[in-house]
Amino acid sequence: MTTTTTLTEPTGAREVPPFATLAVGALALVSALALFAVLGQYGFFGDELYFLAAGQHLSVSYADQGPVLPLIARAMDLIAPGSLIALRIPALLVTVAGIVLAAALAREFGGGRGAQLISAAAYATSPFLFVQGTQLATNTIDAPLWVLITFLVVRWVRTRADSLLIWAGVVTAIDMQVKWLIPFFWVCLAIGVLCYGPRDLLRRPALWIGAAITAVSMVPSLVWQARHGWPQLGMAATVGAEQESIGGRPLFVLIALGAAGLLGVVLLVYGIWCLFRTEALRPYRFLGLTIVLLVLAFLVTGGRPYYAVGVYPVAMAAGAVMLVAGRARWTRIAAVPVIALSVLLGVSSLPWQPESSIEPSTGGVDLLLHGKFGWPELAEATDSAYRSRIPAERADAVIVTESYWQAGALETYRDQYGWPAVYSPSRGYGYFGAPPDSATAVLYVGGRAEELREHFGTVTEIGRADSRLGYEGATRDVTIWWCERPVRPWSQLWPEIRHL
């Protein structure tokens, strides 16, 4: 039996009281200030260094991402060269936009001041949705774009304004230049619409105009991928293997739910239930199935648990609206400690800790924190090793690193130390190009002796990089080698050692 909950305006956006607008704006401002306060904490994350390096090799596509992040990194580095805070400002802005969109979703469902604030607060206290605003990452941009697309779809259901579907296509086209995940959303949404309606959505020409815009925008990227052997598809297997190494599918659902935060997971679960069972939200039932299918799809395909997090805010918003509309005394009583604890957890998730109180990495998810430490030490150790072998500039020498993080870091320090070109066979860095065949001497950062001896005639350990707070294999316990006489020209060797 379907549950009926009475709303003043069940499926339409309410007239927004000025206080509600001010309250959401105040929450967004406080959130922005909290994020800004920690933007300069620690150092560059490994991926950020890679984005900066990729920005020096601008392309229509990359082996492991679209061109948006390298473009952002390049633009911010031109505005403020070497600035960690400047690089992360776009992450802050899109995260705050996500908070505002979360409130707007609640409004579309008919929620008033309280529902909008609770919905926005759920986003702002999520240890993933909010905290990702402290650094530039693909998901930092991807998730708010999902929220915007979901908002446009929800608004179309209420207004039937077809221009919204065209705009949804435009935003999808942009998102495809970040990550190739949004097609999962549209496939799951289509299944939800076929099951629950409104089936008219799939017949709207505007929807297919938006799809055509996305398809046309993808042509340059698809051509690049085809010419390079479709490495983005190969990343799926790499991600799946990484997930298995840190717990695999048994932990997937727990991690996926945990990404929503305390208030967020309460509203997420309740919101999905309401989308299926509440008469007031009947036109939006397809979204409940969409969320469930997305989580299952990423679980089955070996995706990361946070891949579906961009669709959570629509369920959070639905949950917030129905929670407030229920007017039960126990919900008002329970809401206060839940919200308070959520705020506490959200604030504690931000990188406030002084470096002196941080413990060394133990592996696994520690890389999210420890991946920001040790890059200056790596550069110093690399330079010391390099100068011990090459006191003067040598034309046949290059630097190669085992990890794309290391390559991005050394590229950042390259002008400061006057090194030759930096290369890496790792991830997208391997597609930036191979060392020239004339390079017969290599300073190799990372890697293992037995593997290197398969590719070089001489392999000698000449240095070591180590940082107390560094991440194992990236900036902690890293061996530096001097390698000479590649067994084959680089043009032949590179495709063999390049890996995702």
Image: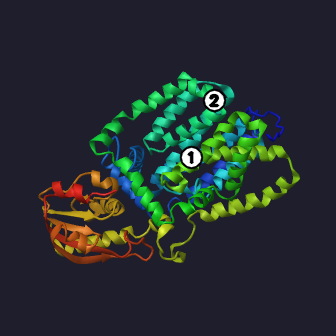
Q: Is residue 491 left or right of residue 35?
A: left
Q: Nearer the viewer, residue 245 or 33?
A: 245
Q: Residue at x 41, y 61 (%)?
A: 46
Q: Earlier in the sequence, mark 1 or mark 2?
A: 2
Is residue 13 positioned above or below 497 on the image?
Answer: above
Q: Is residue 452 left or right of residue 187?
A: left
Tag 2: amino acid: Trp
Judge depth for marks 1 and 2 and give the one in front: 1
Location of residue 92 in the rendering, given as x and y in whole percent from the top left corner: 54, 51
Q: Quadrant of the C terminus?
A: bottom left
Which residue is most to the top? 205
Q: Is residue 447 left or right of residue 158?
A: left
Q: Residue at x 62, y 28 (%)?
A: 199
Q: Which residue is mark 1?
A: 294
Label for residue 489? Answer: none
Residue 283: image quadrant is top right
Location of residue 419 in the rendering, given as x and y in whole percent from the top left corner: 23, 63
Residue 202: image quadrant is top right
Residue density around tag 2, few if under 14, some if 14–19, many if 20 or more, within 10 Å:
some
Location of residue 106 in the rendering, given as x and y in whole percent from the top left corner: 71, 41
Q: Quadrant of the N terminus?
A: top right
Is residue 65 positioned above or below 463 on the image?
Answer: above
Residue 68: image quadrant is top left
